[in-house]
Amino acid sequence: MKLLTDLFSTDYGLMSIIGIGFMLCMAAFFVRMFLVKMNEPPTPHPATGAHAGLGNNLPPSH
């Protein structure tokens, strides 16, 4: 019972609750973000799309 009293009534106990709550919220945010990113279809890289037809856009050499 003393542990719960210290946890909810002291400054270090409240800071521990806040820290644990913040870490749990961060973990939930990252899990959600990674799941959404994994399910997105891949998009082509814009730099590689411009160089895909590198030899086709050159003027003919005589």
Image (tube, helix red, strand yellow):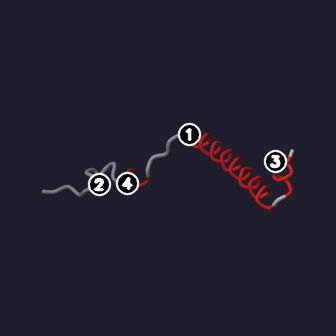
Judge depth for marks 4 and 2 and give the one in front: 4
Where is residue 29 drawn, in percent x and y?
67, 48
Q: Distance between the residues labelled 1 and 4?
A: 26 Å
Q: Residues within 10 Å of mark 3 (few under 14, many from 20)?
A: few
Foreground label between 2 and 3:
3
Q: Residues within 10 Å of mark 2 (few under 14, many from 20)?
A: few
Circle nearer the N terminus (3, 1): 3
Residue 28 in the image, given as x and y percentages of width and height? 68, 44
Between disc 1 and disc 4, the foreground one is: 1
Q: Where is residue 53 in the image (x, y as percent from the top left)?
A: 31, 49
Residue at image position (63%, 42%) is: 31
Q: Residue furthest front?
A: 2
Q: Judging from the image, what secondary structure is the residue with disc 1 in? A: helix
- Per the model, the C-alpha gap separating discs 4 and 2 is 11 Å
Q: Mark 4 points at which residue?
A: 50
Residue found 54% across the figure and 40% down from its top:
41
Q: What residue type is labelled 1?
A: Met
What is the CA distance from the residue labelled 2 to the residue labelled 1? 35 Å
* Figure quadrant of the C terminus: bottom left
Q: Mark 1 points at which residue?
A: 38
Of labels 2 and 1, earlier in sequence is 1
Three-letter residue code for mark 2: Asn
Residue position for label 3:
3
- Camera-nearest residue between 10 and 30: 10
Q: Is mark 4 on a helix, strand or loop?
A: helix
Judging depth in this view, the residue of 17 and 25 nearest the camera is 17
Q: Mark 2 points at which residue?
A: 57
